[in-house]
Image (spheres, rainbow, N blue to C red):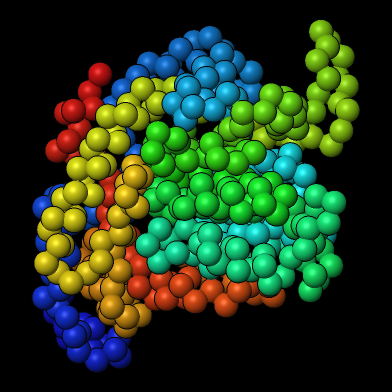
Amino acid sequence: MSSTTLHRTGQGPMYNETLYDTVLDAVSRLHGVPPTPLHRPVFRGREKQLLAECIDSNFVSSVGAMVSEFEEAVARFVGARFAVATVNGTAALHVALMLAGVQRGDEVLSQALTFIATCNALAYTGAHPVFVDVDKDTLGMSPDALRRFLEANVRVREGVAWNIATGRRISACVPMHTFGFPARIAEISQICADYSIPLVEDAAESLGSWVGERHTGTFGRLATLSFNGNKIITTGGGGMIVTDDEVLARRAKHLTTTAKVPHLYEFVHDEVGYNYRLPNLNAALGCAQMEKLSTMLVVKADIANGYREMLAASGLTVVDGLPGTTPNYWLNAVLFGSLRERDEFLEYSNSKGVMARPVWRLMSRLPMYSGCQNDGLENSKWLEERVVNLPSSVPEARFGGLEA
Ligand SMILES: *Cc1c(COP(=O)(O)O)cnc(C)c1O
């Protein structure tokens, strides 16, 4: 596409076509010729075999052995004692928040720079989201912003954190590990402990991301994962609640499976439960995908390395993990110089079939959540104007390494 096409969009001439071509050149050297999706799933293991086993066994729905196998594989991988599979990541977070003690009318601290699912799950509990800022380097919740907000707004009385401006209880804090880059989670965890606020990690994007030797999602009381089609591994749709607390794990299983009291033949339910079960078919996909996760992570790190090297001289900031962390490099991200440059690049790249994407619009700017309290969100706003995700699938040329 020439810059004349852009003239038609009324944006004036492109001001850095050389830069945009440098980025697109890096994309095509890693991913081949367009169309280039942002992230596409890879099925190179026992997926078909395990799906066939499910069908042959007749256990395709909410009962079956694959579900517990998948749960055990994920718990083992992240180093948590328990994992409870759910129908998707949003459902997992909804129930995790309930189990953390979040009730209607409470407030829950989170970040405005996140995917809508975080905020929706929070709203399902009837709680009010409160947004604190993120760090520019991790794109995740800023411990400094969190502490500043708490010092200015919150008092702890008898083990309960109260927002003095609203008179509401703050019953959870939900940071998110954006694009798989670990947030400063150890510091966040300490601050939450200081204020008696339960920590629930939204680790939907960070399966395979570590802080030192510790997997993201093991720093709080509970954490949630997602296996949606665009995530690092997929079950078609699916989620997981992870925790070290056996009582919470049992409650999670009970609540997500209609709260049925175990009985040989009677239907008795002892509270309002949810049909948030992951079907056995989806769990079969999950089992096969887990077998390839470690290999996938090596390839993902290679792609990130490729972008870093090819864009080193471009002037763009390529987002990377903090020292001491190992990101899963689920989605690669670069920072453009301004909103105009970001938009120009997105226009240019998408018109050429390269599905680069901007970061999500801030939750604080969506009509449902625009009335929520926030701390000014300086870094979130800055990032919103600059972050672009580049195609991050496992390239076809690397499929060989993924064969069984
Ligand atoms: C994907 C995702 C979820 C969960 O999404 P589902 O599509 O319901 O599995 C939650 N939070 C974040 C940040 C996500 O990216």
Look at the picture and state if 99 lies above or below 133: above
**Residue 393 visible in the shown view:** yes
224 vs 227, nearest the viewer: 224
The x and y percentages for residue 271 are 87, 33
At 38% from the left and 27% from the top, the residue drawn is: 289
Look at the picture and state if 70 lies above or below 163: above
Quarter of the image with the N terminus is bottom left
271 vs 51, nearest the viewer: 271
At 20% from the left and 66% from the top, the residue drawn is: 352
The x and y percentages for residue 138 are 40, 58
**Residue 280 visible in the shown view:** no
Using residue 153 as the reference point, say whether residue 264 is left or right of it. right
Look at the picture and state if 154 lies above or below 44: below
Give the total of numbered labels. 0
The x and y percentages for residue 31 are 17, 49
Using residue 173 as the reference point, say whether residue 264 is left or right of it. right
The x and y percentages for residue 140 are 47, 58
Using residue 248 as the reference point, say whether residue 8 is left or right of it. left
At 61% from the left and 28% from the top, the residue drawn is: 244
At 40% from the left and 66% from the top, the residue drawn is: 136
Look at the picture and state if 227 lies above or below 246: below
Which image quadrant is residue 324 in?
top left
Quarter of the image with the C terminus is top left
189 vs 337, nearest the viewer: 189
